[in-house]
Amino acid sequence: MLRSGSLLDFSGKRDGGPAHVRYMDHREISEIFSKDELPSEATRSSSTPYMNAFISEGNVRLMDGQGVTIGEMEPTPQQYTVLKRFVDHVLRDEGYFYLDLSDNDGKTVASREYYPADGSARIIRDIKEYFKNGELPYKSELSQFRYSTVLGDSDLVAANRQLRKDLSEMRAKLKARTARKEYGKGRSGTMDIRQIMAG
């Protein structure tokens, strides 16, 4: 998501394929960087530094079915508006939401998992609090206990989180593979990121 609140289209819709299927990995944002703009640690074999550089410019990484990664720049009012809708969508469809806050090198400096009872308003407040005070607000032990009684001990919670991420990634890969078979027929199904940025 750009600073304006606009979303980049990583589906195949603009290339003639179906909507709501992600054809491109977020790391393919590397295509918009010129050689003079390459992050110093970037190499042709890894596109992750390009994605981190893009996030460090105030853009937000949205991962449908999971959550968001926000860099060192606080979201704009336009981004907060879109974030609220996105959080509502993920909480409703998945039953959980992950917030990752990272530094300019992509290292996670704060992270939290939320559930529908938390609601999008609390998550947005927590993000704003982080940018005001440099840390996420304290989460009471009572609140943590409430969820732990439902999900089990901390090891089970961590395992559950990883399984949900794995399942979400497998679903996305299956959707993309199915859509490529229907749409591909001799085409790669990959969009040119410059088309996205120009559109």
Image: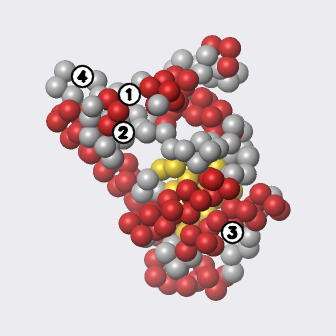
Q: Residue visible at 21% across and 41% down? A: 178
Of pointers 2 and 3, the one earlier in the residue sequence? 2
How far is mark 4 from mark 1, CA to CA?
Answer: 11 Å
Secondary structure of the residue carrying tag 2 is loop
Q: Which residue is mark 1?
A: 191
Give residue 125's mark: 3
Query: Who's the residue at 52% across and 22% down the image?
Result: 31
Which sits earlier in the primary sequence, circle 1 or circle 2? 2
Q: Is residue 159 visible?
A: no
Q: Looking at the picture, how far across and down is residue 36, in whole percent?
A: 68, 14
Q: Say whether disc 1 or disc 3 marks the residue closer to the N-terminus.
A: 3
Q: Disc 3 versus disc 4: distance between alpha carbons?
A: 45 Å
Precedes in sequence: disc 3 or disc 4? 3
Q: Which residue is mark 2?
A: 11
Dot 2 amino acid type: Ser
- As drawn, is 121 to the left or to the right of 198? right
Q: Earlier in the sequence, mark 4 or mark 2?
A: 2
